[in-house]
Amino acid sequence: MTKILFVCMGNICRSPMAEGMFRKAIDEAGLSRHVAADSAGTHAYHVGSAPDVRAQEAVRRRGVDISQLRGRKVADEDFERFDYILVMDGDNYSQLIRRAPAQHHGKIRRLLSFSRKYPNLDVVDPYYGGTQGFEENLDMIEDAVQGLIREITGDTRVKMRSGR
């Protein structure tokens, strides 16, 4: 089983949106039995909290329910447990590289390193902005998720059906 961890700062906006959209994509690709996903934050600000209501509404418009997810902080054992640790921005990347044992550094990558449209950019935190930021994040996440599935499966034909 391939295990993916999506990471942002508080685990209430970007990483739960990525987890939800990725789970939808692996379901659509018939990979649910072979790929697992989780999300976490680099900070403990929102441990136990549901995703931000705006994040829930944005993914719901694309056919995904993330209301059952709860915030958690990245744990030391996550570096061993996950095959991919995908961060939303450079700050998250730097924090995890400093924290992770050297043998796990190769697992830590920016989510958008898998994107064709937005390669190696940051998925900017939409928390202090309006709803448009969440929609822009989801466009980026959907594109990157397709690339991630292509890498996992080695199949260049994989394409997620967008809910938009």
Image (tube, grey):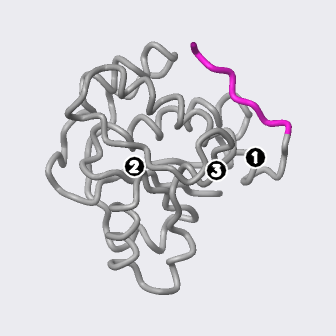
* Secondary-structure class at tag 2: strand
* Relative to 135, 71 lies left or right: left
Q: Which one is in front, 51 or 96? A: 96
* Relative to 150, 137 lies left or right: left
Q: Position of residue 44 (x, y in %)?
A: 17, 56
Q: What is the spatial separation of the Cα atoms under label 3 and label 2, in whole angstroms?
A: 17 Å
Residue visible at 61% across and 49% down? Answer: 119
Q: What is the spatial separation of the Cα atoms under label 2 and label 1, in whole angstroms?
A: 20 Å
Q: Which residue is mark 3?
A: 114
Q: Main secondary structure of the magenta part?
A: loop
Instruction: Tell me the magenta residue range.
Output: 157-164
Amino acid type at image mark 1: Arg
The C terminus, quarter of image: top right
Q: Which one is in front, 82 or 94? A: 94
Residue visible at 79% across and 36% down? Answer: 158
Q: Is residue 114 above or below residue 107?
A: above
